[in-house]
Image (cartoon, helix red, strand yellow):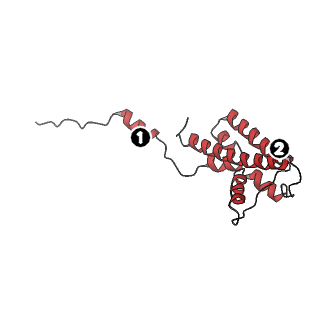
Amino acid sequence: MATTPPAKAAPASKNIEKASQPKSPLFSAALLLGWLIPGAGHLLSRRWVRGGLLFAAIGLMFILGLLMQGKLYTANLADPLVFLGFIGDLGSGLLYISGRLFGVGQTPVQVVTADYGTKFIVVAGLLNVIAAVDAHNIRIGRKS
């Protein structure tokens, strides 16, 4: 009677590695939530301290910018610099949307600090975009 040798099974470690590698979607809930609410993407990934610090830092920068009478940019394709400012502001997510809805940041610049305030608002938005991408990378397993 001829016996055939048993088929070699793949090592278990290779199967585990393939199963544990997450797919990298283009968008995740952490990315969208992190953009809408500063720090929320990190809170979704249970990074409590980082999420809280980002919420406080970005929110404080945005509010300080408004208190310095900073300007919220609108979408104006005719002027590239104004449009880039709008993109930066839009990065703040719901902070920018609620600011536009309540009409803050619309007054003409009358004080010297308003220019600094405008920059604070733009930087808060850009920092929020970076934080949302960081939360997305943590969520999909690209970063620990």
Residue 108 placement, left or right of 25: right
Q: Position of residue 83 (x, y in %)?
A: 70, 60
Whether residue 134 is visible here, answered yes or no, is yes
Q: Position of residue 125 (x, y in %)?
A: 71, 48
User: Of label 2 and label 1, which has the lower sequence position?
Assistant: 1
Q: From what the image shows, is residue 29 above or below residue 14?
A: below
Quadrant showing the C terminus? top right
State the residue position of label 1.
18
Q: Quadrant of residue 132?
A: top right
- Picture disc at residue 144: none
Q: Position of residue 114 (x, y in %)?
A: 84, 49
In the image, 95 versus 32, the foreground residue is 95
State the residue position of label 2.
64
Q: Residue at x 41, y 40 (%)?
A: 18
Q: Residue furthest bottom?
A: 78
Q: Residue furthest right?
A: 110
Type of the residue with mark 2: Leu
Quadrant showing the N terminus? top left
Q: Label 1 near label 2: C-beta < 8 Å?
A: no
Q: Residue at x 79, y 41 (%)?
A: 60
Q: Position of residue 50 (x, y in %)?
A: 68, 35
In the image, 50 versus 120, the foreground residue is 120
Q: Residue at x 49, y 43 (%)?
A: 22
Type of the residue with mark 1: Lys
Residue 12 placement, left or right of 60: left
Classify mark 2: residues with Cα within 10 Å, few (<14), some (14-19) or many (20+): some
Q: Residue at x 58, y 40 (%)?
A: 138
Q: Residue furthest left?
A: 1
How far, Cα to Cα, is label 2 from label 1?
Answer: 48 Å
Tag 2 secondary structure: helix
Residue 91 placement, left or right of 70: left
Whether residue 37 is visible here, answered yes or no, is no
